[in-house]
Image (tube, grey):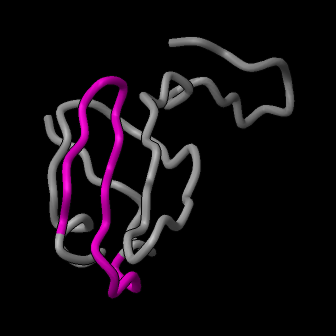
Amino acid sequence: MTYRVEQFVRKIKSPVTVKIENETVSYPNGESLAEASFDEHVKIESITAQSDKIIIQLTKNDNVNDTSWSDKDNCYF
């Protein structure tokens, strides 16, 4: 199964550098990042600007299925 980042990144017109753990990947713009696939569910941890690039820090999203919709404590499946 493949995953994608939150799609609001499509609005970024500047070059984007994505950092995931020890890996760094560059994209020409947010549109390219929005179309990229990832092997695990990731979330945007932070967004910063440095010179003419946008730096996006991604982290693994471990809380994908931890919500209980019955207003009780979180459930882990």
Is residue 15 placed above or below 57 in the rendered structure? below
Left or right position of 24 against 58: left
* Quarter of the image with the N terminus in it: top left
x%, y% of residue 64? Answer: 49, 31
User: Which residue is situated farthest in the front direction here?
Assistant: 51
Residue located at (66% from left, 30% from top)? 67
Left or right position of 65 against 39: right
Q: What residue span does the magenta drawing correspond to?
A: 10-27
The residue nearer to you, when weighing 32 against 5, is 32
Is 26 covered by the magenta stretch? yes
Residue located at (30% from left, 74% from top)? 30
x%, y% of residue 42? Answer: 39, 39
Residue located at (40% from left, 72% from top)? 9
x%, y% of residue 65? Answer: 52, 27
Counting labels gives 0
x%, y% of residue 41? Answer: 35, 35
Is residue 57 placed above or below 22 in the rendered structure? below
Left or right position of 3 against 10: left
Left or right position of 21 against 72: left
Residue located at (30% from left, 24% from top)? 22
Is 64 covered by the magenta stretch? no
The residue nearer to you, when weighing 16 against 77, is 16
